[in-house]
Image (tube, rainbow, N blue to C red):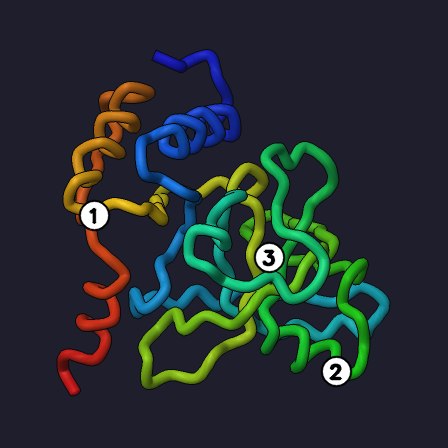
Amino acid sequence: MLANMNPGEILRALLERLRALPGVESAGLISDLPLSGDGNDTSFTIDGRPPERTNADDRAASSGYFEALRIPLLKGRTFRETETGPGEVLISRSFAEQYFPGQDPIGQHLAVDHGFPFHCEIVGVVGDVLHRSLADKARPTMYAPYTQVPNLRANLVIHARTSILGLASAPKQEVQAIDASVPVFAVHTMSDLVFDSVGPQ
């Protein structure tokens, strides 16, 4: 239906549709959900320092993701609706503390290995998230805009005033209204992910 649109435009159109659903307060996209057990270590270097490569958890996120999961913005800003300028990145509190102790990381530049050179400027610091399990400690994490680092998979995150069960079919309908070939599956609440993380213990 929207074959003439680029991936960034399609994602924005999808989020606009989701945010317009009754009861939805905020919505966004993330490549890997918190507590999913998925790690995605990616190497990077910091401009102006010796070219020592180090690793951090790496996620692709859209505008609205941090608001939907109530991840606090600690400094700077989150992503804008349209990210068409130079590369931008958000970092977590633990990233800032480990790599910029006693410094302001806003405005610093990174070169991230995304399979292609992604040069980006740190525009914000957000709260830590446990990506692997509740038993794990927070790891330094960086977030690139989904529109600048396309990913083959996406997790929709919705914060709503109504029951997720009542909304379960609506996001699928909105996705397939844009592209009927895209599969939509595995609808969960955050409570489900927390239970799955601590269930074995």
Q: Residue at x 65, y 50 (%)?
A: 117
Q: Are marks 2 and 3 in contact (CB under 8 Å)?
A: no
Identified by mark 3, the residue type is Asp
State the image coordinates of residue 7 (x, y, percent, origin top left): 47, 28
Q: Residue at x 34, y 44 (%)?
A: 156
Q: Which residue is mark 3?
A: 113
Mark 3: which secondary structure? Answer: strand
Q: Are marks 1 and 3 in contact (CB under 8 Å)?
A: no
- The quadrant of the picture occupied by the N terminus is top left
Q: Are marks 1 and 2 in contact (CB under 8 Å)?
A: no
Earlier along the polypeptide chain: callout 1 or callout 2? 2
Front tag of 1 and 3: 1
Q: Residue at x 20, y 54 (%)?
A: 188
Query: Relative to the observer, which residue lies in front, 26 or 134?
Result: 26
Identified by mark 2, the residue type is Pro
- How packed mark 2 is, by other alpha carbons closer than 10 Å (few <14, some 14-19, many 20 or more), is few
Mark-to-mark CA distance, 1 and 3? 40 Å
State the image coordinates of residue 4 (x, y, percent, origin top left): 46, 12
| Residue 93, quarter of picture | bottom right
Front tag of 2 and 3: 2
Earlier along the polypeptide chain: callout 1 or callout 3? 3
Q: Which residue is mark 1?
A: 163
Q: Which residue is mark 2?
A: 101
State the image coordinates of residue 152 (x, y, percent, origin top left): 38, 41
Q: Residue at x 26, y 34 (%)?
A: 171
Task: Say whether residue 11 is left or right of residue 179.
Answer: right
Q: In the displayed structure, would residue 171 be above or below residue 63?
A: above
Identified by mark 1, the residue type is Ser
Mark-to-mark CA distance, 2 and 3? 23 Å
